[in-house]
Image (cartoon, rainbow, N blue to C red):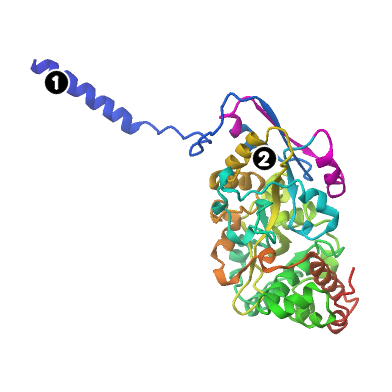
């Protein structure tokens, strides 16, 4: 009896030790999501958009198929997306889900598109909209949510942290520090401490600098915002701080326009130029940053001498920079599509912290959730105080307003017009 008891105790101990030494099994990607429909359901779900490819979404398709293996999901790029979307939604082969954008709101051209949008805040659908940062959720005049952000965007600068460390310079946190840091790098032989795309007004670095400061100026003055949205010339004066910031960066030698003009686009070429390793700060948007991970291996310079980099707000004031929190890609559901129940089931799976963060990680875009720490590149934006986070869509910024500041900043930055001339021209830029 004693021997048998000893054997049992030894076996129990061995089992216990083995359990302690073993690695816990990873939870499946679908953990936390409970299917609400028959998992044997067979149907097709199509998502249409303007991206050439969408690996992040396709990865989400794979995870959804772990639960619903017989649902065929596909992504299709539509050529000339903005012009053909309304026609496609009216056609026979209707997509289930489609890209939508805040700038479509109020544009009569997209009235047929809005007519197809499902009300996504309907409690019966069960979408966890609370997992999305509130400033990214757009409500229409009736309080409905017709678009849900999948990715978000912001404005800032790629920072070569290793270069700062090598030269013994701290990353600037205020406007005065930024000017001093640029002067310090220039004294060490860096001709253009800051760089960015500058060939055309669209996506130019001038707008990336000016837009956040202009929006912040309007955010504190509802009357000014109303004038700016109405394209009233009186609103031009509110552009002054933003335009003067652009002008001062160039005048002080922080940015060499001739060097920037050699960058041919605001995506691949901006990234590859930054990866050369001699640019302390590269002004761009988060949409540009999304391409960095793929291009690390495409850059011979970066492959030979990799360095640590982050994406930070541009410190435009004495209190620091702004986090301009805007949706990048939003999804809407076509309420007249086939298999609407399964379409909403996929959206319920998609709009969760885990799935949205995983998609953002694959695409390296800013997640629309509150967790900005999952990708260290965006960590600096997670440290921006709440009073310096501005959501243009919630604020009521309209697209015609953005056209004014974009063109004004570009023409002032290139020296085509003065700040005063740009201010007087507000409302006339096309």
Could you say where residue 304 lies in the image, as x and y percent from the top left? 68, 48
Q: Which of marks 2 and 1 is in front?
A: 2
Q: Which residue is drawn at 74% across and 50% down?
A: 100
Q: Residue at x 73, y 80 (%)?
A: 241
**Quarter that holds the C terminus:** bottom right
Q: Position of residue 412 (x, y in %)?
A: 85, 76
Depicted 132 relative to depicted 34: above or below: below
* Residue carrying label 1: 6
Can you name the residue that lies furthest to the front here? 142
Q: Can residue 140 be seen in this view?
A: yes
Q: Look at the image and give the residue range highlighted in magenta.
A: 64-93
What's the mark number on residue 50? none
Mark 2 / mark 1, whichever is N-terminal: 1
Is residue 277 on the magenta stretch? no
Cα separation between marks 2 and 1: 56 Å
Q: How crowded is mark 1: few (under 14 residues within 10 Å), some or many (20 or more)?
A: few
Residue at point 68%, 56% (across, down): 327
Q: Can residue 264 be seen in this view?
A: no
Q: Residue furthest left?
A: 2
In the rendered structure, find residue 57 and report the number of the disc placed on it.
2
**Magenta-colored stretch includes residue 82:** yes
Q: Would you identify the image quadrant in which residue 191 lies?
A: bottom right
The image quadrant of residue 206 is bottom right
SS state under label 2: helix
150 up-or-down from 203: above or below: above
Who is closer to the viewer here, 405 or 397?
A: 397
Q: Contact, CB < 8 Å: mark 2 with mark 1?
A: no
Q: Residue 361's spot in the image, x, y percent? A: 61, 46
Badge 2 crowding class, 10 Å Cα cut-off, few under 14, some 14 to 19, many 20 or more, is: many
């Amino acid at each position: 009896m004693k021997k048998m008891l000893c054997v049992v105790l030894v076996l129990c101990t061995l089992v216990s030790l083995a359990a302690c030494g073993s690695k816990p099994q990873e939870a499946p990607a679908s953990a936390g999501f409970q299917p609400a429909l028959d998992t044997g359901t067979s149907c097709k779900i199509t998502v249409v958009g303007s991206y050439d490819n969408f690996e992040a979404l396709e990865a989400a398709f794979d995870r959804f198929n772990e639960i619903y293996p017989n649902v065929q999901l596909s992504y299709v790029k539509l050529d000339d997306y903005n012009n053909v979307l309304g026609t496609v939604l009216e056609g026979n082969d209707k997509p289930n889900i489609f890209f939508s954008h805040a700038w479509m709101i109020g544009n009569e051209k997209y009235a047929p598109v809005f007519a197809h949008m499902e009300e996504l805040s309907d409690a019966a659908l069960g979408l966890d909209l609370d997992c999305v940062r509130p400033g990214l959720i757009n409500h229409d005049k009736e309080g409905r949510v017709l678009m849900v952000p999948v990715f978000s965007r912001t404005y800032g600068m790629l920072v070569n942290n290793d270069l700062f460390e090598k030269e013994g310079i701290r990353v600037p946190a205020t406007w005065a520090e930024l000017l001093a840091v640029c002067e310090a790098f220039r004294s060490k032989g860096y001709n253009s401490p800051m760089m960015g795309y500058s060939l055309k007004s669209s996506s130019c670095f001038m707008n990336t600098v000016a837009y956040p400061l202009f929006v912040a100026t309007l955010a504190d003055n509802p009357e000014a915002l109303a004038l700016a949205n109405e394209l009233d010339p009186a609103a031009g004066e509110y552009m002054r701080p933003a335009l003067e910031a652009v002008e001062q960066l160039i005048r002080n030698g922080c940015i060499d326009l001739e060097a920037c003009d050699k960058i041919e686009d605001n995506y691949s070429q901006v990234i590859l130029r930054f990866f050369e390793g001699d640019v302390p700060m590269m002004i761009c948007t988060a949409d540009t940053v999304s391409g960095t991970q793929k291009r690390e291996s495409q850059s011979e310079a970066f492959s030979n001498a990799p360095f640590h980099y982050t994406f930070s707000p541009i410190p435009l004031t004495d209190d620091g920079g702004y986090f301009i929190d805007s949706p990048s890609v939003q999804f809407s559901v076509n309420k007249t599509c086939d298999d609407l129940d399964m379409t909403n089931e996929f959206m319920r799976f998609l709009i969760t912290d885990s799935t949205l963060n995983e998609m953002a990680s694959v695409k390296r875009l800013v997640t629309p959730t509150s967790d900005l720490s999952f990708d260290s590149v965006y960590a600096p934006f997670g440290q921006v105080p709440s009073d310096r986070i501005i959501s243009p869509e919630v604020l009521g910024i309209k697209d015609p307003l953005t056209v004014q500041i974009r063109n004004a900043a570009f023409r002032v930055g290139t020296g085509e017009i003065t700040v005063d001339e740009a201010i007087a021209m507000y409302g006339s830029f096309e």
